[in-house]
Image: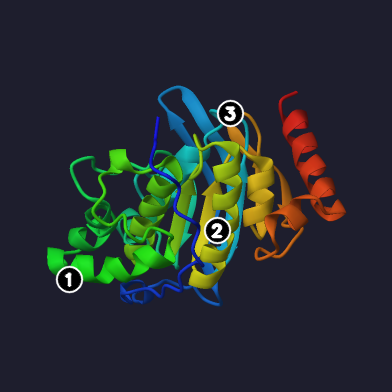
Amino acid sequence: MHTTPEAPLAEPPSLTRPDAEAAQGTVDGSARGQALEVAGVGHSFGELQAIERVDLAAREGEVVGVVGPSGCGKSTLLELIAGLREPAVGQIAVEGESDADRRLARCAYMPQRDLLLPWLRAIDNAALALRNRGVPRRAARRAAAPLFDRFGLAGFESARPSELSGGMRQRVAFLRTLLAGKPVLLLDEPFAGLDAITRAEMQEWLAGALLDGGRTAVLVTHDVEEALYLSDRVVVLSPRPARVIAELTGPAPRMTPRRDAVTSLAFVEARERALAALAGGRR
């Protein structure tokens, strides 16, 4: 059990992409503000069909939520987008690039677990994305250090992961994801395992961080309320094999205070529509 007190949530950072590698070599398409396109994608593991057919698109700076029952293929979809797997059928393009390696070069993937390295201090865990790009350790630390205050982590730069609370670990992991400098963020259940109060605080903080950073993001979660609050649009998937069974517009601007957003009539109605789609998809 974590005993370290939760640091207060800071104002979200304004992070621009530290590199411009992703702007080159795009095919027709990345065109006109379309950051991500998933067209008719299906995937199987041997005889197990994980995804039947999924179509999904995201404009530059848009956050698209993906919800669905456990085991329906949500995490697999993120791996396919990131280029960690190739779809059995269909096509995926990130900034117009369909090649797996080129997709991977444009995506920063934050998996369900924070995957912080226990032997590294918080600042070195955060700077790991820069180190992986060949940035020297001291320079990587210098780049990460100013952001600790803005992420509500000031004073914890030298802490090991075991000395951080769950919410603080998630913030370090998210900082590492942003420092990768990729235009598309793929977030897989970023707050799974956090207690309800911390999760609500992190959702409000992340809403600001995503808006302020201007990145395109695909957010996978099993929490319908979280998806509706954090996303511009929400795609609802059926049980495995996954297919899109509904698409909803986020009912409130992302910077709306969470309590005001989730208690509004429009939000409650959108949540009920999403839950009805999920229930209908199980039949």
Which quadrant of the figure contains the N terminus?
Answer: top left
Q: Nearer the viewer, residue 164 or 109?
A: 164
Q: Is residue 263 visible?
A: yes
- Image position, residue 185 (x, y; %): 45, 58
- Image position, residue 105 (x, y; %): 31, 61
The amino acid sitting under disc 2 is Trp
Closer to the N terminus: mark 3 or mark 1? 1
Q: Is residue 57 visible?
A: no
Distance, label 3 to label 1, CA atoms, is 45 Å
- Image position, residue 273 (x, y; %): 81, 42
**Residue at the spot 47% in from the left edge and 50% down from the top edge:** 187
Closer to the N terminus: mark 3 or mark 2? 2
**Residue at the spot 69% in from the left edge and 45% down from the top edge:** 225
Q: Are marks 3 and 1 in contact (CB under 8 Å)?
A: no
The amino acid sitting under disc 3 is Arg
**Would you say 159 lies left or right of 273 here?**
left
Closer to the N terminus: mark 1 or mark 2? 1
Q: Which residue is mark 3?
A: 240
Within 10 Å of disc 3 (Cα), the crowding (few <14, some 14-19, many 20+) is: many
- Image position, residue 138 (x, y; %): 14, 67
**Would you say 136 lies left or right of 90 here?**
left
**Residue at the spot 62% in from the left edge and 36% down from the top edge:** 68
Task: Residue 205: give its label.
Answer: 2
Which one is in front in this view, the residue at disc 3 or the one at disc 1? 1
Element carrying mark 1:
helix
Element carrying mark 3:
loop
Q: Which residue is mark 1?
A: 139
Distance, label 1 to label 2, CA atoms, is 27 Å
Q: Nearer the viewer, residue 261 or 210?
A: 261
